[in-house]
């Protein structure tokens, strides 16, 4: 089973890029973030023609998450535990082929002095609460998405410059580690110990060409699923497109 995660940064702008990538890579499950469309405007018909079922949770212009799957999707849940109907569309969960898949778009935080930074930490607390109350680490489970956090020095091109700043702040790292303490493993790090492998590059200052990036997109897996992990890698090819997202897909392969 091939499970991928990609912050598409507007599915309306990058629909053709998405469809081309899906045809090339053929993921069994694809988790999208920042779709930025209401559900009625999601390209469901186009994806169904490629053999995908779709579960989505969108809103106009901001946020939005979706799970695409070649196999039937069941037990769909929108949002985190305790969230109301007006909450930002940042989380969706579903079961596909016996694997529980949680797809999240963690708030950016804006700056470490902003109230939004505190809300980012609280959001991660609610994510851990959701795992504790609604999921089980003893079953095959994947948590993936854009977490807007670099885990360690290998995950940012200039660690000394960014240390203590947004995306590389110890409070963020502790909050993410608290989520992972549920019983989750970084599948990319299980197969790749090297640094300078990133999933996000700013559009400005030729950051992609210079490889001045960050690894902030992850596929985490429960220890129950870990023995089935074959590989996890970052696909840089979509970043070479004419109108790329500032993120690129992370792809994990598991045995069935």
Image: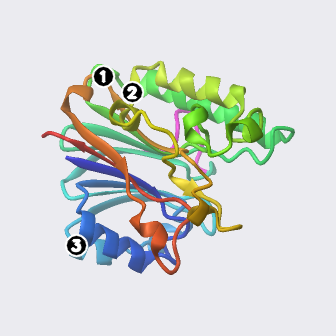
Asked whether disc 3 touches disc 1, contact meaning CB atoms under 8 Å apart, the reply is no
Dot 1, how many residues are within 10 Å of its Cα: few (below 14), some (14-19), or many (20+)? Answer: some
Dot 3, how many residues are within 10 Å of its Cα: few (below 14), some (14-19), or many (20+)? Answer: few
Q: Residue furthest left?
A: 256
**Is any atom of residue 44 visible in this view?**
no
Q: List x then y, in percent, for residue 39.
A: 47, 67
Asked whether disc 3 touches disc 2, contact meaning CB atoms under 8 Å apart, the reply is no
Nearest to viewer (mark 3 / mark 2): 2
Q: Earlier in the sequence, mark 1 or mark 2?
A: 2
Distance from Cα at disc 1 to Cα at disc 2: 7 Å
- Residue tagged by mark 3? 50
**How is this picture coloured?**
rainbow
Q: Secondary structure at mark 2?
A: strand
- Residue tagged by mark 2? 185
| Residue at 45% from the left image edge and 37% from the top image edge | 194
162 sits to left or right of 203: right
Residue 155 location, quadrant: top right
- Residue tagged by mark 1? 223
| Residue at 38% from the left image edge and 38% from the top image edge | 188
Q: List x then y, in percent, for residue 31.
A: 39, 53
222 sits to left or right of 173: left
Which SS type dominates the magenta stretch? loop
Asked whether disc 1 touches disc 2, contact meaning CB atoms under 8 Å apart, the reply is yes
| Residue at 24% from the left image edge and 49% from the top image edge | 2
In the image, the segment drawn in magenta is 77-85
119 sits to left or right of 180: right
């Amino acid at each position: 089973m091939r499970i991928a995660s990609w912050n598409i940064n507007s599915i309306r702008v990058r629909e053709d890029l998405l469809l081309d990538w899906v045809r090339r890579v053929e993921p069994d499950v694809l988790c999208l973030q920042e779709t930025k469309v209401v559900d009625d405007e999601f390209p469901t018909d186009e994806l169904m023609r490629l053999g995908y079922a779709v579960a989505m949770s969108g809103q106009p212009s901001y946020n939005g998450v979706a799970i695409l799957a070649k196999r039937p999707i069941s037990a769909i849940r929108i949002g985190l535990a305790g969230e109301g109907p007006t909450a930002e569309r940042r989380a969706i969960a579903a079961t596909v082929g016996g694997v529980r898949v949680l797809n999240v778009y963690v708030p950016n935080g804006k700056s470490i002095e902003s109230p939004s930074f505190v809300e980012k930490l609280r959001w991660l607390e609610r994510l851990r609460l959701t795992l504790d109350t609604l999921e089980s680490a003893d079953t095959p489970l994947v948590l993936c998405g854009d977490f807007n956090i670099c885990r360690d020095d290998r995950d940012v091109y200039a660690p000394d410059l960014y240390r203590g700043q947004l995306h590389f702040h110890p409070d963020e790292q502790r909050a993410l580690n608290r989520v992972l303490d549920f019983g989750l493993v970084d599948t990319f790090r299980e197969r790749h110990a090297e640094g300078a492998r990133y999933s996000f590059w700013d559009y400005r200052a030729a950051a992609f060409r210079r490889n001045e990036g960050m690894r902030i997109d992850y596929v985490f897996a429960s220890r129950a699923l870990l023995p089935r992990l074959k590989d996890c890698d970052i696909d840089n090819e979509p970043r070479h497109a004419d109108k790329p997202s500032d993120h690129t897909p992370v792809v994990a392969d598991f045995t069935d």
